[in-house]
Structures are given as structure tokens and as C-alpha cells.
Image (cartoon, grey):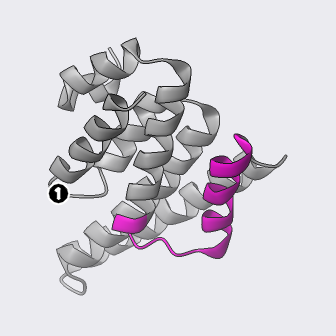
């Protein structure tokens, strides 16, 4: 069982049954949603998303760069969580930092071709993923 099946079993099944090109399109929709929702406006992140959209792949070394970015953003989120626990930061600050890390992870999964994980990570960028589910439903309904 993949993690998407735990939160959206029907969508996970649709993705599993979808064609490779439909899964790729769904990954791009999910990663774009995550980056936008989390306001991850890093120029390199936006460039990598653009590369995926146009070239179906990212340049050599991008996966290592994304892994390092995810680690950095995860560490920042944990530091903010410690501040929340100490009463010096708000839970909204933590949720924003967490969303940024998950958006980067969604992009990394899209680049790796792991649609289910890409969508799962994208869903983690929002407290209510209904709009993501709608976007994916539309994308999977087109041929």
C-alpha cells in the first residue's frame, strides 16, 4: 500500500489504472499545486518545474539538489516546531514551513516519476486537499 491510498484510495486506484502520460500530467498538476499553495517561489524550483513541463526530465544533478533542499526545508520546519513548543513561534509558521518542504518533495517525486508519492506530498501542503483532488479529477478525465 502506498501512502496516497491511506488518504485518497479511489484517486490512488485511478492513478494506478491511468496511462503513463496521464500519470505524468497528474504529477505536474500536483507539483505545480504544491509549489503554488506553499508559496515556494524559489527560482531554481520554478525552473525545475518548467523543465519537467517542457522537457519531460530535469537536468543532471537536479535530484541531488532537490534532496538537499528538502532536507534544508525539513530542518527549518523542525526548528520552527521547536519554537512553537517554546512559545516563540506560531503553529501557522510551522505549517507554512512544513508545506514548503512537502512542495519540494512533491517536485522531487514528479521528477522521479512517482506519481502517487508526488500527489501525497502535494496534499500535505494544504489542510484541505479538495481543490487538489478536483484538479486531478479534471486532469485524469481528459485524454
- Left or right, residue 73 beside residue 9: right
Q: Residue at x 37, y 22 (%)?
A: 15
**Residue 44 highlighted magenta (yes or no):** yes
Q: Residues within 10 Å of mark 1 (few under 14, many from 20)?
A: few
Residue 49 in picture, x, y percent from top left? 61, 56
62 versus 57 height, above or below: below
Main secondary structure found in the magenta portion: helix
Screen quadrant of the N terminus: top left
11 versus 126 height, above or below: above
Q: Residue at x 24, y 87 (%)?
A: 88
Q: Residue at x 42, y 18 (%)?
A: 18
**Residue 35 highlighted magenta (yes or no):** no
Q: Which region shows up in magenta?
A: 36-56
Q: Nearer the viewer, residue 8 or 137?
A: 137
Furthest residue to the front? 143
Residue 31 visible (yes or no): yes
Q: Nearer the viewer, residue 93 or 34?
A: 34
Please give the residue where the numbered disc 1 appears in the rendered image.
127
Q: Nearer the viewer, residue 115 or 125?
A: 115
- Left or right, residue 29 beside residue 130: right
Residue 14 in picture, x, y percent from top left? 30, 19
112 versus 132 height, above or below: above
- Left or right, residue 9 beside residue 26: left
Residue 41 in picture, x, y percent from top left? 52, 75
Q: In which quarter of the view is residue 116 placed?
A: top left
Q: Secondary structure at mark 1?
A: loop
Residue 34 in picture, x, y percent from top left? 39, 57
Amino acid at each position: 500500500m502506498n501512502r496516497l491510498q491511506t488518504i485518497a484510495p479511489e484517486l490512488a486506484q485511478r492513478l494506478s489504472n491511468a496511462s503513463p502520460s496521464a500519470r505524468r500530467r497528474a504529477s505536474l498538476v500536483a507539483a505545480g499545486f504544491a509549489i503554488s499553495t506553499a508559496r515556494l517561489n524559489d527560482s531554481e524550483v520554478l525552473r525545475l518545474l518548467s523543465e519537467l513541463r517542457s522537457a519531460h526530465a530535469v537536468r543532471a544533478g537536479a535530484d541531488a539538489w532537490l534532496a538537499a533542499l528538502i532536507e534544508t526545508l525539513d530542518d527549518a520546519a523542525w526548528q520552527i516546531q521547536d519554537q512553537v513548543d517554546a512559545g516563540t513561534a506560531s503553529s501557522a509558521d510551522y505549517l507554512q514551513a512544513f508545506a514548503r518542504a512537502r512542495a519540494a518533495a512533491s517536485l522531487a517525486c514528479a521528477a522521479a516519476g512517482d506519481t502517487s508519492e508526488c500527489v501525497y506530498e502535494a496534499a500535505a501542503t494544504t489542510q484541505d486537499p479538495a481543490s487538489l483532488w478536483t484538479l486531478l479529477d479534471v486532469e485524469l478525465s481528459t485524454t
